């Protein structure tokens, strides 16, 4: 298992950052001014390192979101560095009071990005819902509200009930890798349970080539027919809504019976040109019934 190694790595990291002293307000102010005025990178480094332990503390607030703590710490450190670049020491508050917003923002973005392949939390309201919903549900349960309804949570968070239901579903279901093991031993994977009932790529290619060949042969067979025969085949056999024999007769100013005879002769020619095209037999018998 890898958990002990992760824990050891975190312990080593904590031991390292404990070596950096927390700055007094006056010293922090001087360093922040040096960086703001003169771009002193050594001053910026001191501002960052003196607050690293606070990043770890904030990361623990998100430990229930099933992400590696060290990954959260790394994201929080990026937020801390961003805060140092933006910090205005003349406004009278401590760096960490300002930086905590950036640290949390980077951590939350990381959690949302890695929670699911489906985008969630894209708006401020959705982000708030993502991180507050479980807390609200726990608070309601502490108030002896068993299985709190979405309506109650929606009222507390000032969002729609449907949004609460959707987010609750997303929070309760994480993405699962198709390569993940079903039995914990790697002998059976999720991907093995997925059965593709459709045609294989080879079968699809064969069907595509067959359709292309049939289309080519039909075009060649039609070219051997005269104008009236070709018209009848196209409008009686090769359409979803075939014309009646009477309509064919009216088009060429011939009787319905004459149209039927021409159709029969055309089908014979098509059958000779396409001996494997058995559907023409049923087409001939079916077309004879169409008035």
Image (cartoon, helix red, strand yellow):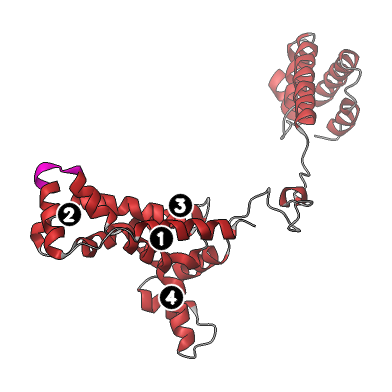
Looking at the image, residue 119 sits to the left or right of residue 54; the answer is: right
Q: Could you tell which of marks 4 and 3 lies nearer the N-terminus?
A: 3
The span shown in magenta is 36-41
Q: CA distance from mark 4 to mark 3?
A: 20 Å
Look at mark 3 in the image and give the residue it sits on: 113
Of residue 189 and residue 10, the one placed in the foreground of this image is: 10
- Of the residues under marks 2 and 3, which one precedes in the sequence? 2
Query: Which of labels 1 and 3 is toward the front?
Result: 1
Q: Which residue is rendered at x = 50% and y = 70% of the image?
A: 165
Residue at mark 4: 135
* Marks 1/3: CA–CA distance: 26 Å
Question: Marks 1 and 4: which is nearer the front?
Answer: 1
Point out residue 118 in the picture as x, y percentages from the top left corner.
Answer: 51, 52
Q: Does residue 85 show up? A: no
Residue 177 in the image: state x and y as whole percent: 64, 51
Mark 2 is surrounded, within 10 Å at the Cα level, by few (under 14), some (14 to 19) or many (20 or more) other residues, namely many
Crowding at dot 4, Cα within 10 Å, few <14 / some 14-19 / many 20+, comes out as: few
Q: Which residue is label 1 attached to? A: 14
Pair 4/2: label in front? 2
């Amino acid at each position: 298992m890898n958990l002990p190694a992760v824990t050891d790595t975190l312990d080593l990291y904590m031991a390292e950052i404990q070596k950096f002293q927390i700055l007094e307000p006056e010293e922090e102010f001087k360093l922040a001014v040096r960086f703001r005025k003169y771009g002193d990178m050594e001053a910026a480094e001191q501002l960052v390192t003196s607050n690293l332990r606070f990043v770890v503390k904030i990361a623990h607030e998100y430990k229930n979101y099933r992400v590696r703590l060290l990954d959260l710490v790394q994201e929080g450190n990026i937020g801390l560095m961003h805060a140092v670049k933006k910090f205005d020491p003349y406004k009278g508050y401590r760096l960490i009071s300002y930086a905590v917003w950036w640290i949390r923002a980077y951590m939350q973005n990381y959690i949302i990005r890695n929670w699911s392949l489906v985008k969630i939390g894209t708006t401020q309201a959705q982000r708030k819902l993502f991180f507050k919903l479980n807390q609200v549900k726990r608070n309601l349960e502490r108030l002896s509200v068993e299985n709190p309804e979405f309506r109650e949570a929606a009222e507390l968070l000032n969002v729609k009930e449907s949004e609460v239901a959707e987010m609750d579903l997303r929070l309760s279901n994480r993405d699962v890798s198709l390569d993940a093991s079903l039995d914990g031993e790697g002998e059976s994977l999720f991907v093995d349970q997925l059965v593709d009932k459709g045609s294989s790529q080879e079968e699809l290619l064969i069907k595509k080539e067959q359709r292309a060949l049939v289309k080519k042969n039909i075009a060649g067979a039609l070219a051997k027919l005269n104008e009236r025969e070709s018209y009848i085949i196209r409008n009686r056999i090769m359409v979803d809504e075939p014309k009646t024999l009477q309509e064919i007769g009216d088009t060429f100013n011939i009787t319905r019976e004459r149209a039927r005879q021409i159709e029969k002769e055309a089908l014979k020619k098509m059958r000779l040109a396409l001996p494997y095209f058995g559907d023409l037999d049923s087409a001939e018998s079916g077309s004879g019934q169409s008035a």
